[in-house]
Image (cartoon, grey):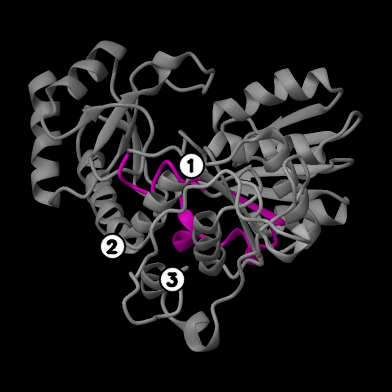
Amino acid sequence: MQDGEPGSAEPGSREPGSAASRSPGTRVVHAGLASAEAGTPLLAGPVFAAPYHLPGDPNQTPYGYGRYANPTWTAYENALASLEDARHAVVFSSGMAACAAVMLSTLRPGDVFVAPSDGYPMLRTIAHGHLAERGVETRLVPTAADWTCAIDGARLVWMETPSNPSLDTCDVASIATAAHAAGALVALDNTLATPLGQRPLDLGCDLAIYADTKAMTGHADLLMGHVTTRDDALAKQIRDWRSQTGSVPGPFETWLAHRSLATLDVRLERQCANAQALAGALRARDDVTDVRHPGIGMIVSFTLESAERAQRFIEACELVTDATSFGGLHSTAERRARWGHGDDVAEGFIRFSAGIEARDDLLRDVQAALDQTA
């Protein structure tokens, strides 16, 4: 595999033996680790390389040039694939790189793309820009609406449930069945739920997409994304896109992501419990409306009576950082309408990402900030 020629590392595969029957909390701790050998680390360090030693036939090794494959990617991809019994995981430099790889590698002029109107706004930006310029028709459907009519003639049907930021949900299995009957591929952005909360491939999706920047890595210090699939041809197509466009992650960032993955289950347990408790406390207040928590994930959304009140509330919190993104160890909140993305939310709408702070401390902080700004 010479510079400029395609190639790929070995795909991720199901964990051997009885590992596939272990609980998700155990699997994330051991996912992607090499066989134990005396004197070796539990998680091998990152491999930094552009070219590799490559005598003779380049197809005899998966590692020839750093844009095509890296042992650190392989370990992390094996870990990610094992979490949802996927045949393949393909890691990217960001969640948007993963999204773009799926959209732009599968859609051709004349195709129809069906996507949520209330999902991540950058998806719509690509659809109305790059896809429209290539002659791809986009049909937008609210997550909680009936998708049936929009699916007819589609090439790619894309879901995001729970949706971001509205936290609406849809019946993934039913939509996937209808989409396949219409001859479409099915993709699901599973960033919020993570593979521990929802397994898109088991529900009939061809592709699952993740922004690992969020809960998968969980420390708010990495940009990373990945795609999983059980389809060999789709995996090759997406790997080729990654190699040809160069949307590859650095080995150190990938190693950090793999290291962080082991705590996903314990982080989610605290975050989701905090989110559920917060939702209950907010529903008990007369000055908070439209409290949403779908029973999965760490996000709670709610609305205060004005943009000014919402901003003062966030500023009054001592344990909550005013920041975009979600899924990190630290609780964050933001007034979503400030972005002007057309998310169809009120000016006082707040997306709150619960961190791993002690529940009572977090609830006291939020209640005090609401009381102070009432």
Closer to us: mark 1 or mark 2? 1
Q: Is residue 215 left or right of residue 239?
A: left
- Mark 3 or mark 2, which is nearer the start of the sequence? 3
Query: Label 2 sits on what residue type?
Result: Val
Most foreground residue, 20 or 315: 20
| Dot label at residue 266 | 2
> Residue sitting at 38 percent across and 58 percent down?
45
Residue 346, percent across and down? 41, 19
Instruction: Give the side of residue 77 with respect to residue 154, left or right.
Output: left
Q: Which residue is mark 3?
A: 33
Residue 329 within the magenta-colored segment of the rendering: no
Quadrant in which residue 109 is drawn = top right
* Residue 147 visible in rendering: no
- From the image, which quarter does the C terminus lie in? top left
Question: 46 or 134: which is nearer to us?
Answer: 46
Q: Earlier in the sequence, mark 1 or mark 3?
A: 3
Q: Amino acid at mark 1?
A: Gly
Point out residue 129 in the picture as x, y percentages from the top left corner. 71, 18
Range covered by the magenta-colored residues: 191-220
Classed neighbour count for the residue bearing mark 3: other residues with Cα under 10 Å, few (<14), some (14–19), many (≥20): some
Task: Provide the secondary structure element on which disc 1 rests.
Answer: loop
Q: Position of residue 229 (x, y in %)?
A: 67, 59
Q: Which residue is mark 1?
A: 250
Q: In 3D space, how far apart are the residues under numbered discs 1 and 3 (Cα atoms)? A: 19 Å
Residue at figure coordinates x 79%, y 37% from the top left: 150
For residue 32, above or below residue 367? below
- Location of residue 323 in the rendering, given as x and y in whole percent from the top left corner: 30, 26
